[in-house]
Amino acid sequence: MKIKARKDIHTLKKIISQHYDQYNIINDSKVNDITYFIVVEKFFYRTSNRASLSIVITEYDEFTSIIEAIGSGGGQGWIFKFDWGVKSSFEKAIPNILEQNNIHFDMISE
């Protein structure tokens, strides 16, 4: 999923990182002056599934940023290697986070 958000990169990084505080943040790094990379992971005991979300936030201009998010998930064993909808749920959280914080955005691709 790719989103163009009308907010500066540093504010977006802070908001997204705070939202995922209760998850296992695997990576939260500044790649360069205009790019942040965040990887979040969560394990669901009930279904023995894991899910991860890789997020790249890039500065488009001073007041606009591009967010790219790719979800991943799966179960255990050769029969249960599907994500039960966790991937799309993790990805859809990004627009919800933006809406909750009154940040205007446009979906570029899903």
Image (cartoon, rainbow, N blue to C red):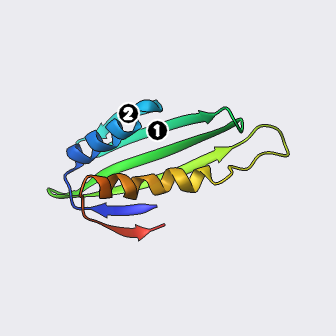
Residue 46 in the image: state x and y as whole percent. Answer: 69, 35
Sort mark 2 into few (<14), some (14-19) or many (20+) by Cα contacts within 10 Å: some
Residue 50 in the image: state x and y as whole percent. Answer: 63, 38
Q: Residue at x 38, y 68 (%)?
A: 107
Q: Residue at x 46, y 61 (%)?
A: 1
Sort mark 1 into few (<14), some (14-19) or many (20+) by Cα contacts within 10 Å: many
> Mark 2 sits on what residue?
28
Residue 91 in the image: state x and y as whole percent. Answer: 49, 54
| Vertical position of residue 97 compared to residue 109: above or below | above
| Vertical position of residue 76 compared to residue 101: above or below | above
Disc on the earlier residue, 1 or 2:
2
User: Which label sits on residue 39?
Assistant: 1
Question: What's the amino acid at mark 2?
Answer: Asp
| Vertical position of residue 74 compared to residue 105: above or below | above
| Vertical position of residue 108 compared to residue 85: above or below | below
**Residue 87 appears left or right of 25:** right
- Say which quarter of the image contains residue 14: top left
Q: Residue at x 31, y 63 (%)?
A: 4
**Residue 8 appears left or right of 3:** left
**Residue 72 appears left or right of 57:** right
Q: How many discs mark residues in the rendered view?
A: 2
Question: What's the amino acid at mark 1?
Answer: Val
User: Which label sits on residue 95?
Assistant: none
Residue 11 in the image: state x and y as whole percent. Answer: 21, 45
Confirm or deny contact between disc 1 and disc 2 (CB under 8 A). Answer: yes
Mark 1 residue element: strand
Q: Residue furthest left?
A: 62
Q: Residue at x 39, y 70 (%)?
A: 108
Mark 2 residue element: strand
